[in-house]
Image: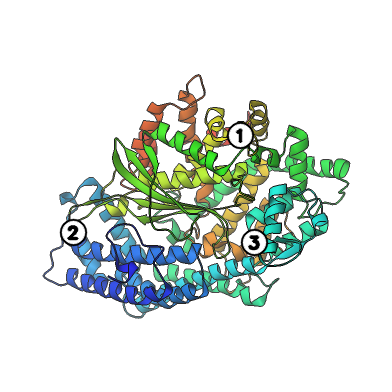
Amino acid sequence: MSNPLLDFNDLPLFDAVRPEHVAPAMDELLAQADQALATVTAADFPARWDAMAKTLDVATERLGRAWGVVGHLNSVADTPELRAAYNEALPRVTEFWTRLGADERLYAKYKAIAPAGLSAEQRQAHKNALRNFTLSGAELTGAAKTRFAEIQERQAELSQKFSENALDATDAFSYYADADELDGVPADVVQAARAAAEAEGKDGHKLTLKMPSYLPVMQFGHNRPLRERLYRAYVTRASDQGDPKFDNSALIREILALRKEEAQLLGYSSFAEVSLVPKMAESPAQVIQFLRDLARRARPHAEKDVADMRAFAAEHLGIAAPQAWDWPYIGEKLKEARYSFSEQEVKEYFTAPKVLAGLFKIIETLFEVAIRRDYAPAWHPAVEFYRIEREGKLVGQFYLDQPARTGKRGGAWMDDVRARWLRPDDGRLQTPVAHLVCNFAEGVEGKPALLTHDDVITLFHESGHGLHHMLTQVNERDVSGISGVEWDAVELPSQFMENFCWEWGVLKYMTAHVETGEPLPRELFDKLLAAKNFQSGLATLRQIEFALFDMLVHTDHDPQADFMPLLQQVREEVSVLRPPAFSRTAHTFSHIFAGGYAAGYYSYKWAEVLSADAYAAFEETAGKDGLPSVATGRKYRQAILEAGGSRPAMESFKAFRGREPTLDALLRHQGMASPQQ
């Protein structure tokens, strides 16, 4: 078998996949999936869950896995050749999934399956499937059905192009700074910038818009013109303010128009209504009210944050009229003055290997598993591979890709390689495999990479998603792990894990100074903890600004109209630090225009209510040493992680907590609780 994309014996052969493998593999797998669809929709094929799974699900799972490999490589190892191969196959793959989801013969077969003969897991998967058929246009006929399919194909193209523009606009920028321009920037960042310039045979220090380069300059660089240069480049990426060939403006308008048309074809007034059908939230109005209520509670704290920064900037930094590119710098300086430490000082203790060891220790202790190094073919030498075992048995495996690099899209994410599944073709139990992807700085001069505390939180966040996927005990693929979990509950396990980054009992095991090997001093941790909610009001309003724009742009907004006035209106309503008029954050808002969060970005705040309340159970049962209770960890693992999507998220939450969630824990964790609330 010469095509690695057609090898399903074990793990994907990432190191062997070439762009020329994509088209033939998709040809073959699409043909097999088409044949399977024809077989199960024949009049004489039995309307039985197991029979359909054995034929159709086996074929579509193989297609999904192979296409997942191509999509993953497109995200982490982008090349012009791979991008071309991906884009060539994308319409064909999209067309198949659209046709499958809207096939009225297949829909009829599913409707004919008697739920009484199914297991609890299968009943949930069956219920989800019927709902998904409706949302995929299975009840449409004639011209409406044809148009619906065209919309799906075009949306897939537009989202991919949006993502490419965002990546290319980010990669296209570089500035070669002199040493004196980098006054105040951390030494390891300066070294990395110098090394990047040397690698290109250039003088100076190469600065980019990738987070490990951009953010330290914004936070620590004393040079205001340099901060302004980088800020303007960053907030105008892929927009009408930058290189026209990367401008996402027209794509956004077309994406919004197509989503509205799709919603109307399905009988809904807005795309937000469609988006919420499979979620916990009941209506766009409920979400908007939730966001505005949270904004109201956060606003006084945010206004005080800004007033404090203005006063500090005028008195101590000589900045009388702060601009957008000054706020991260002012905030960092104020934090240093108020809490007597700097992010850079803390970062020296967070070496990547030590942090990872600490993360694994808490996972192993809390969830009664063992994590071991493992081997698998990977797409880059920096990728690590691990296995998770319980009682000596393999539970799941994951790839960990930490460093930022050219050709790798920004941000951090978890994605599945394959799901846990009691396979209907051969009766084998397939164990789940996940990707955990971050964009951290690399180590320089032979030293390990240093992570900021925010990086540590990101790593814990993505591991929470990974655990949700890998620790599942559900054998039905469509509801195992993260599959079938309501989108606004899917962030619960990820945000839950973030809390451990603030526990001394956990943190002390994951720090070692890069030079001395000494652990983080308790005194420095106490300062870090005291600063935990520094500007939490501002951070909350920033998230609400994104979420409210997302929900409003998918409800009443006319897609033909410019979306910038709506963004401006949201900023005026929510923000206390209004970005300049040239800021174009929507143009790189990949979560909603190239990801799964359209009319769903509110999920982060919604799930934070769940995760804070869930974590409160650990606070209530912690031992005298501050370490979390293993018994509570076991209950959480069984009620939430192991259950996956096999039941509604609220049922899982109540199984763990014994009640519905409340807002109290979130407000308390973020230092925004007050007596009248």
Residue 496 location in percent, x, y? 48, 39
Q: Quadrant of residue 296?
A: top right
The residue at the far front in this view is 446
Q: Secondary structure at mark 1?
A: loop
Q: In the image, what residue occupies the spot 75% across and 37% down? A: 336
Residue 596 visible: yes
Amino acid carrying label 2: it is Asp
Report x, y in % for residue 409: 55, 62
* Residue at image point 69% right, 41% down: 343
In primary-sequence order, the first of circles 3 and 2 is 2
- Find residue 584 and report its image quarter: bottom right
Residue at (53, 65) in percent of width and height: 593
Tag count in the figure?
A: 3
Q: Toward the viewer: 169 or 347?
A: 347
Quadrant for residue 346, please give it: top right
- The reply to whether discs 2 and 1 touch (Cβ–Cβ < 8 Å) is no
Give the percent coordinates (x, y) of residue 35.
22, 74
Which residue is tagged 3? 585
Q: Which residue is mark 2?
A: 425
Q: Which residue is mark 1?
A: 517
- Label 3 to label 2, Cα distance in Å? 47 Å
- Tell me: residue 649, above or below residue 585: above
In this orientation, does residue 559 appear?
Answer: no
**Mark 2 to mark 1 CA distance (whole Å):** 52 Å
